[in-house]
Each structure stands twice: as C-alpha cells, then as structure tokens.
Amino acid sequence: MALENSYDVPLHDIKQIVEIEDYSLYYFIGAVTISALLIALAVFLLYKWNKKKSKFNIRKEHEKLLNLVDLNDTKNAAYAITLYGLTFKNDSPRHKEMYENLLSRLEGYKYKKSVDEFDSETIGYIELFKGMIDA
C-alpha cells in the first residue's frame, strides 16, 4: 500500500470556524465615556469651588473699609462713611433711618475747606451704625 499525497483527505479533528461575539470595543468606549464624564464633572466642580472662593463681596469689603476709616481725618472720614455706609442703607428701615440721621450729622463736616474734629455725639452715631452692620 502506497501513501498517496492527496489534499482531499477529510480531516475529522478540526472543527469549522465559529464566529465569536467580541464586546471589547463596546467596553472600551463605555469606559472612556464614563472616565470623560467623571473628569468633566471634577473640572466643573473645581471651577465652581474656585469661583465661589474668589467671589468679590462688596458688602464685606465696604464693611472692612468702614471699620478702617480714620476718624481723626474728619473731612475724608465724613465722605468715606457716606460712601461706604450707602451699601448698607437698604438693609432694613432701621438701617435707612440711621443712615439718613448719620448723613445729616456728617453734612457739617463736608463741603468746607477746614472742619473741626467730630463731636462725641457724631462719633457715637458712627459707632452705632458700624455696630448695626452685618455683612
């Protein structure tokens, strides 16, 4: 019996090619999407936190400036108190009344070339107005 070199020999131990479902591309796209969303959320939260942290608050700034006014420099102090106190004028009817009363007392210290020192009653009104402020 001679061996024949034939290519038509049926092979029984090799199975046909079977198509395998491959979901790795979908898993990769899902992982990239979720990662991108988490990174975007983190950037957004950092932006909001930084914006809130660095937000300029005019009320706090004017309260600080109002407390730093030098009452010995009467004329400039009268102008500064008028300017910075205006920020707190409409907080309540009591604030408005106090501000207008303080304004009428400060009128005598403005619009003149030289002015005297604040009298004790005016200083009392200024301190009372500062004490009423809550920024």
Image (cartoon, helix red, strand yellow):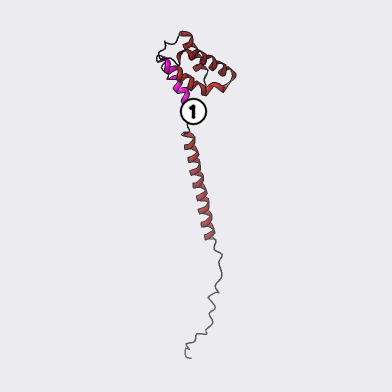
Local packing at callout 1 (Cα closer than 10 Å; few below 14, some 14-19, many 20+) is: few
Which residue is identified by label 1? 58
Residue at point 48%, 11% (across, down) = 122
Residue 23 to residue 42: above or below: below
Task: Please count the marks in the image.
Answer: 1
Q: Nearer the viewer, residue 65 or 135?
A: 65
Task: Determine the residue located farthest toward the top in the rendered image.
Answer: 120
Q: Nearer the viewer, residue 49 or 38?
A: 49
Residue at point 46%, 26% (across, down) = 61
Q: Is residue 67 magenta?
A: yes
The amino acid type, in three-letter code, at marker 1 is Ile
Residue at point 48%, 9% (across, down) = 121
Q: Is residue 127 magenta?
A: no
Give the dominant element type of the magenta stretch: helix, strand or loop.
helix
Q: Position of residue 81 (x, y in %)?
A: 47, 19
Q: Secondary structure at mark 1?
A: helix
Q: Position of residue 65 (x, y in %)?
A: 44, 22
Q: Nearer the viewer, residue 92 or 4?
A: 92
Q: Position of residue 123 (x, y in %)?
A: 46, 11
In the figure, is residue 119 to the left or right of 92? left
Q: Which residues are magenta?
A: 60-77
Task: Determine the residue located farthest toward the right in the rendered image.
Answer: 93
